[in-house]
Image (cartoon, helix red, strand yellow):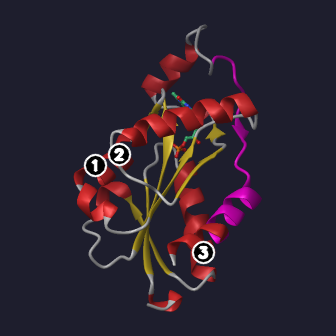
Amino acid sequence: MSTESKRILVAFATRYGSTREVAEAVAAALGEKGFQATLRPARKAGDWNGYDALVVGAPLYLGSWHKEALRLLADRQEAARARPVAVFALGPLHDEAGEREAARVQLRKALDGLRLEPVAVEVFCGKYDPARLRLGDRLLAGLPASPLHGLPASDARDWTAIRSWARELAGRLR
Ligand SMILES: Cc1cc2nc3c(=O)[nH]c(=O)nc-3n(C[C@H](O)[C@H](O)[C@H](O)COP(=O)(O)O)c2cc1C
């Protein structure tokens, strides 16, 4: 099958929108590489019969990958194993090796239960805005023991790294 005819579903889960924007950039980069990339929320992904490959992106919350992304892959494990799957997570709020490694461990744990062999697994830094937190997250961030306590708004998403990952991914999804 030629690259031009390959269809890729880019499914994302998000709570505050930052992962959606990353998924958009990934879909756009794959589109520039000649794929037909369709962007969908994970919970509305439908069936994947029409897609040759799957990219699933979701944020980490309290050590877990967003449940809508997990559910998408867990509910259709056979379909997931039948095509190349790439996954990414948003999480660390600072571009620090320790935070990134902790997030990688969180993502790997989430994927362990799925018995899936993704062609690529990546963690990107995320975005945080205390003024937009939902009640539960706000209460949590307000606890003195929380790592979010007192953190200012930040956006550590590295768009150059995100686009170059997506471009490099194109080679693995062929
Ligand atoms: C309450 C809360 C808990 C979080 N927990 C984690 C975590 O366990 N690990 C991590 O790497 N990032 C964590 N983050 C950072 C988010 O993953 C990051 O803000 C991400 O960009 C949010 O994505 P979204 O805008 O798509 O929802 C947390 C953020 C909040 C607000």
Q: Which residue is mark 1?
A: 74
Say above or below: 93 vs 163. Answer: above
Measuring from the top left, give residue 58's x and y in whole percent: 48, 48
Q: Residues within 10 Å of mark 1 (few under 14, many from 20)?
A: some
Measuring from the top left, give residue 78's x and y in whole percent: 24, 60
Quarter of the image with the N terminus is: bottom left
Q: Are marks 1 and 2 in contact (CB under 8 Å)?
A: yes
The answer to if 44 sits in the magenta stretch is no
Q: Nearer the viewer, residue 114 or 158?
A: 114
Q: Residues within 10 Å of mark 3 (few under 14, many from 20)?
A: few
- Amino acid type shown at disc 1: Ala
Write down the region rendered in magenta: 149-167
Q: Nearer the viewer, mark 2 or mark 3?
A: 3
Q: Which residue is mark 3?
A: 171
Q: Which residue is mark 2?
A: 70
- Amino acid type shown at disc 2: Leu
> Is 99 left or right of 81, judged from the image as shown?
right
Return the disc, 2 or 3, that comes first in the chain's sequence.
2
The span from disc 2 to disc 3 (Cα, nearest Å) is 25 Å
Return the disc, 1 or 3, that comes first in the chain's sequence.
1
Describe the element under mark 3 as helix, strand or loop. helix
Say above or below: 113 vs 148. Answer: below
Q: Is the shortest distance between ligand 1 and the CB of mark 1 under 8 Å?
A: no
Whether residue 164 can be seen here: yes
